[in-house]
Image (spheres, rainbow, N blue to C red):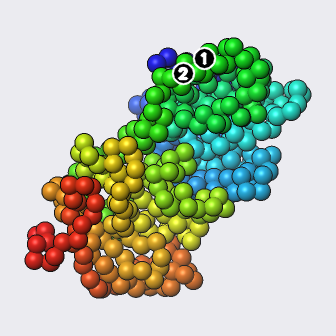
Amino acid sequence: MRHIPLIAFIFATTACQHGADNSTGSSNTTAYTLTEGYHLNEDSVLLFASRKELPEKEADRLFRQAIDVYRNLKDPASALPIFRQAILKAPRAAAFFEYGNALSEMGDGSRSMQAKLSVEQALQAYHIADLLGYKPVSKLLYNTACLYAKAGKEDSAFHYLVSAIEFGYTNTQQIYKDADLAPLREMRWRFDNEVTAALSGASDPDRLLWKLFSHEFQPLELPVVFDTKFREDKEFSFVTYDFEKFIPEMRNAKFSRDVGSEYYYVGSVQSTPQYTVLAYAVQDVMMDESAPYCYYLASFDANGKLLDKMIIGGHRILDEPFRVGKVTGNGDVEVRKFAVRYEKDPAQNGYAENKMEEMNEVGVDYFTISPEGRFTPKSVPLAMK
């Protein structure tokens, strides 16, 4: 696999703004700020992103608003300042990636200085998204290839396109039809030679996509309890829509609802040569940014085909029982169901500053993970202790 060089800096590297030094001469890191003039400066962004207690909820709200304007209203120009606001609140890899996409569209079909600047800024945004850990990197590389192709830089475009394939980009139909890559396809011999060679190296694209997806789930320490406190002291990573084939809730949603629910990697519960059991989370932020997380267990075969799934914690619908699930190391699963009462009606007042006053147990179900990777009910006498 080829080495991926860092995208060349477009802007001169400058020092981040500093707060006053303390008495020992070391910097007060809480005083670092990020301003619009530095929002595409690598050093400034990374230094600011390392700060604790950034307003992440406000940044997420602005990011979803920008996505709505960009994707649903198809207005990248109006989305750009909202993306910048989100970045200045709390820099995130996904925000820089989508900001780069919107900037890329601003550079379409024009040779003006502003269009060229948009392309340069988009490249820098992709570069920072990479540094912040954007996943999947294959999508980032592919979009970079498209940007270079539109800019008439064929050598760089081929480099990033081949790298995208090597890193797991599997949408061959898109590669052969994407209008952005038309300049590369016109170089027929080179395109066929380099792309075909890269694709032949990815002998099973679907399985490679599964590996990229499942690799993001780190093993959970068992036993694990998915209750209202599970999220505390944990930082979940977003699942992007490149992996929607593995999460039915993502796959079945129309894009207009994409900005209403967010999906997160939680961890791996059990893995055998025959199947893998993963836990992921869904939060209905359209309802409320403080809405509780709903946790799923899902099992997949060795090729990533969904075998079984169940809600293990929380609930998706307010009227459903609230679940608290426990998974042990021997594959036993306990799901307790509760009727909950909040201080105020969440449907009218949301979840922020709305205490859960009562949790009355209304039932419990027991399961075990079968040798085939399915969640099989157990009778109460045989249930785990």
> Where's residue 172, x and y in %?
60, 34
Quadrant location of the C terminus?
bottom left
Note whether residue 97 is visible. yes
Q: Position of residue 101 (x, y in %)?
A: 69, 39
Secondary structure at badge 2 equals: helix
Please tell me which residue lies in front, 66 or 383.
Answer: 383
Residue in view at x 37 percent, y 67 percent: 311
User: Crowding near pointer 1: few (<14 within 10 Å), some, many (20+)?
Assistant: some
Report the side of 333 relative to 153 (left or right).
Answer: left
Quarter of the image for residue 123 reads top right
The residue drawn where x is 27% and y is 55% is 373
Q: Where residue 322 appears, x then y in whole percent?
A: 37, 76
**Mark 2 nearby-residue class (10 Å; few <14, some 14–19, many ≥20):** some
Mark 2 in CB contact with mark 1 (< 8 angstroms): yes
Question: Which residue in the structure is indicated by mark 1?
Answer: 194
Residue at image mark 2: 198
Query: x and y percent of residue 339 in the render?
Result: 35, 84
Question: Which residue is depicted at the point 88% across and 30% down?
Answer: 110
SS assignment at label 1: helix
Number of numbered discs overlaid on the protein picture: 2
287, above or below 148, in the image = below
Q: Amino acid at mark 2?
A: Ala
